Image (cartoon, rainbow, N blue to C red):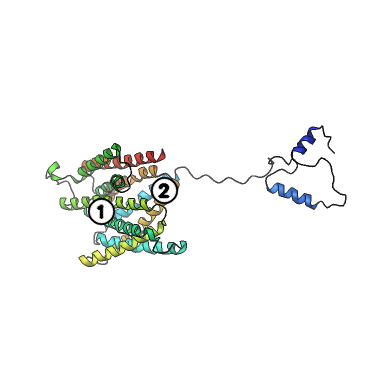
């Protein structure tokens, strides 16, 4: 028995432990043992009864993710997208619309099992179906226009102009979503317009000397305009996705994209009569690789956005332009002009600036 004046008695009294041993001689010790085990499991030390025991084994901490992993995923995504674009450029015996149709079929085979596994259905929420329809139609149109641009103009020019998408997104968000459009956004828009003009090189500004172009100037203009249209349609797609938010499953959005894209491609090919199977076995391999690399690019970009902020991801995504220049020089033996380099710097500065400005606004 502890004396009531001793410090040990005071500590035991604070913890609620009895000061006298009133346990009957015939009582079992099992309840005490069970109580001790319970206190140990709950993290409290049984002998002192007042604080967690320092000798208790703590659970292992969750392993921290590798810093920069999201940016590495973004770099891989840019590489895969650029390689897929190179394959589109190499396939010359198949129309761009037919290439888009093959990619839609390939992605459909991947998306269907995902939708069945996640049990999300194939139609979507009733209030979001119109937005899913528009997302699929506009997104697939943007894909067709980009593939057409790859086939009619240089790989670097088409890639650079397509990077003006953030500028169009800022303007459309101001119009439809009532988001703020500042003087900075206007400045970035001006940079993008200057970059596109440097790449297109209209004759009324640069004269009629276009001998340095590998392709004809009319094809160059068609491809450039298709790239601008792709950027505009892609911006509309981003506005719709932002409007839907997280209320729609990601795979359901891709499902509408591939289904409506396939319907659109088949309709266009039926009207124009351009449907034909590739004669060369190498072209067939390219079609398969376009689907594989396009899907890999989407997967890595999605993973990057899940673990990294959108601002740094968008900046690293501009490596698409670097890969396009390198692939065009090495594999297509086409050295870009200084006009293209200057236009690329303007467009990349515009898209990066618009992204960083938006990121800083959202982080406040």
User: Are the two marked residues, 1 and 2, in contact with CB atoms closer than 8 angstroms?
Assistant: no
- Residue at (39%, 41%) from the top-left corner? 362
For the residue labelled by badge 2, is the local secondary structure a helix, a strand or a loop? helix
Q: Nearer the viewer, residue 150 or 128?
A: 128
Labels 1, 2: front one:
2
The location of residue 28, given as percent across then percent down, is 83, 52
- Residue at (34%, 42%) from the top-left corner? 355
The location of residue 277, given as percent across then percent down, is 27, 67
- Residue at (12%, 43%) from the top-left corner? 204
The location of residue 29, given as percent across then percent down, is 81, 51
- Mark 2 sits on what residue? 305
In the visual, does 22 lie left or right of 81?
Answer: right
- Residue at (43%, 51%) from the top-left corner? 303
Please identify the quarter of the rendering in which residue 84 is found.
Answer: bottom left
- Residue 282 showing in the rendered view: no
Rate crowding at label 1 as few (under 14), some (14 to 19) or many (20 or more) other CA atoms within 10 Å: many
The quarter in which the C terminus is drawn is top left
Rate crowding at label 2 as few (under 14), some (14 to 19) or many (20 or more) other CA atoms within 10 Å: some
In whole angstroms, how far apart are the C-alphas of marks 1 and 2? 26 Å
- Mark 1 sits on what residue? 150
């Amino acid at each position: 028995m502890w004396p009531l004046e001793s410090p040990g008695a005071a500590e035991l009294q604070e913890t609620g432990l009895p000061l006298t041993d009133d346990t009957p001689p015939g009582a079992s010790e099992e309840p005490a043992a069970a109580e001790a085990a319970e206190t140990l499991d709950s993290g409290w030390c049984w002998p002192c009864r007042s604080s967690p025991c320092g000798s208790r084994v703590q659970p292992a901490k969750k392993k921290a993710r590798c810093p920069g992993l999201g940016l590495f995923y973004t770099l891989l995504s840019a590489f895969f997208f650029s390689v897929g674009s190179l394959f589109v450029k190499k396939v010359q015996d198949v129309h761009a619309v037919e290439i888009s149709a093959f990619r839609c079929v390939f992605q459909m085979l991947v998306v269907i099992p995902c939708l069945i596994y996640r049990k999300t259905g194939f139609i979507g929420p009733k209030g979001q179906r119109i937005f899913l329809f528009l997302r699929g139609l506009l997104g697939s149109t943007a894909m067709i226009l980009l593939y057409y641009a790859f086939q009619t103009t240089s790989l670097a020019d088409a890639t650079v102009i397509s990077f003006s998408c953030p500028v169009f997104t800022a303007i459309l968000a101001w119009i439809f979503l009532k988001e703020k459009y500042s003087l900075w956004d206007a400045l970035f828009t001006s940079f993008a317009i200057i970059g596109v003009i440097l790449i297109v090189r209209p004759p009324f500004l640069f004269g009629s000397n276009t001998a340095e172009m590998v392709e004809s100037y009319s094809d160059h203009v068609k491809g450039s305009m298709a790239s601008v249209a792709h950027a505009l349609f892609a911006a509309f797609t981003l506005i719709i996705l932002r409007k839907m938010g997280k209320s729609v499953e990601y795979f359901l959005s891709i499902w509408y994209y591939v289904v409506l894209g396939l319907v659109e491609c088949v309709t266009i090919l039926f009207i124009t009569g351009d449907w034909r199977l590739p004669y060369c076995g190498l072209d067939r391999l390219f079609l398969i690789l376009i689907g594989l690399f396009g899907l890999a690019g989407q997967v890595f970009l999605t993973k990057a956005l899940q673990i990294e902020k959108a601002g740094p991801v968008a900046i690293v995504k501009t490596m698409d332009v670097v890969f396009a220049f390198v692939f065009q020089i090495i594999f297509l033996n086409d050295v870009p002009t200084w006009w293209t380099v200057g236009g690329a710097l303007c467009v990349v500065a515009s898209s990066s600036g618009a992204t960083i400005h938006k990121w800083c606004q959202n982080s406040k």
